[in-house]
Amino acid sequence: MPTQLFFGITPEEYRSIKQRYFGLVTLVDQSIGAILECLERFGLSDHTIVVHTSDHGDSLGAHHLFGKETMFEEATRVPLLIHLPGQTRSKTVSHPVSHIDFVPTLLDLLRQPGHPQCAGKSFLPSINESAPVPENVFIEWAPNRTKIKKGTRLARRRMVKRAVEESTRTLVSPDGWKLCLRDKDSNELYNLKNDPFETGNLYSDRQYASVISQLAGEVHRWQRSTNDKLRL
């Protein structure tokens, strides 16, 4: 094993970071268990909707990265678990949903009217097995104005600076395509069904030109609908 790994971090430091990260995950898991136990003890389980979600994840070394400023799945995917009163069996919604759909869904579960400031849509029909056609999920990222003092073993300072200062608009389609369009850095295309770890960027492959054109058109339509003026 090399003596330096991931931006100059040694293998020992890497293991320590992972241990602390998973230690925090364990703490969260124990805390959730304590809440569920409390609901059970006071007879509230059959009258409570339990929802667990989180902020974006940490790359934790995937793609030689630790932050969450990228569009890789390790940074963009978040857990979303919902337990309903009287629920006796589990159900998995296989198609992607957006975090902005969380509040409309919760309002729907509580039988409350939606709010005009909620941009998302309730995915309660997916939970009730009467789902409409799955829709695209859009993800956006604005520049992180971090000062880059030096390069890394992966890239020169100029390339790191360009990547950090870019803006990204990403589309994840129900059939597994993922397109990342950027204003400064390189664009990306992945097929998450065939390449779930995003190891092969297909954007420069001409055989996928029609896929890119179609998905890019969806991104631009979404930008117009949200008054997003970023030039891609």
Image (cartoon, grey):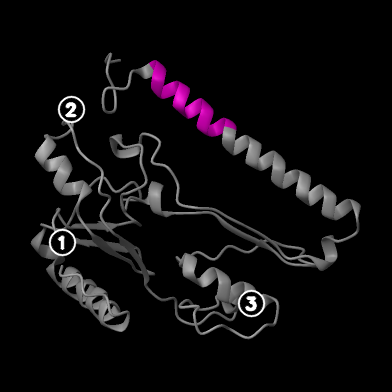
Q: Residue 153 carries which label?
A: 2
* Label 3 – label 2 distance at C-alpha: 48 Å
Label 2, label 1: how far apart the Cα atoms are? 25 Å
User: 144 or 152: nearer the eye?
Assistant: 144
The question of residue 15 being in magenta is answered with yes
Whether 76 is drawn above or below 212: the answer is above
Q: Which marked residue is nearer to the observer: mark 2 or mark 1?
A: 1
The amino acid beneath tag 2 is Arg
Residue type, label 1: Asp
Mark 3 and mark 1 in contact? Answer it, CB < 8 Å. Answer: no
In the image, residue 72 sits, relative to residue 142, either above or below, namely above
Where does the image place residue 145, in percent across and percent down from the top left? 25, 48
The residue indicated by pointer 3 is 107
Q: Indicate which disc residue 90 carries.
A: none
Q: Mark 2 or mark 3, which is nearer the start of the sequence?
A: 3
Residue 127 visible, this orientation:
no
Let me know if residue 133 appears in the view: yes
Left or right: 84, with 134 as reference point: right
Q: Which residue lies most toward the right here? A: 42
Q: Is 173 placed left or right of 157 in the picture?
A: right
| Mark found first going from the N terminus, 3 or 1 | 3
Q: Is residue 24 left or right of residue 62?
A: right
Range of magenta residues: 12-23
Q: Quadrant of residue 211?
A: bottom left
Label 3 and label 1: CA atoms lie apart by 36 Å
Q: How dense is the environment of label 3, judged by Cα within 10 Å: few (below 14), some, or many (20 and up)?
A: some
Amino acid residing under circle 3: Leu
Q: Which residue is identified by label 1?
A: 183
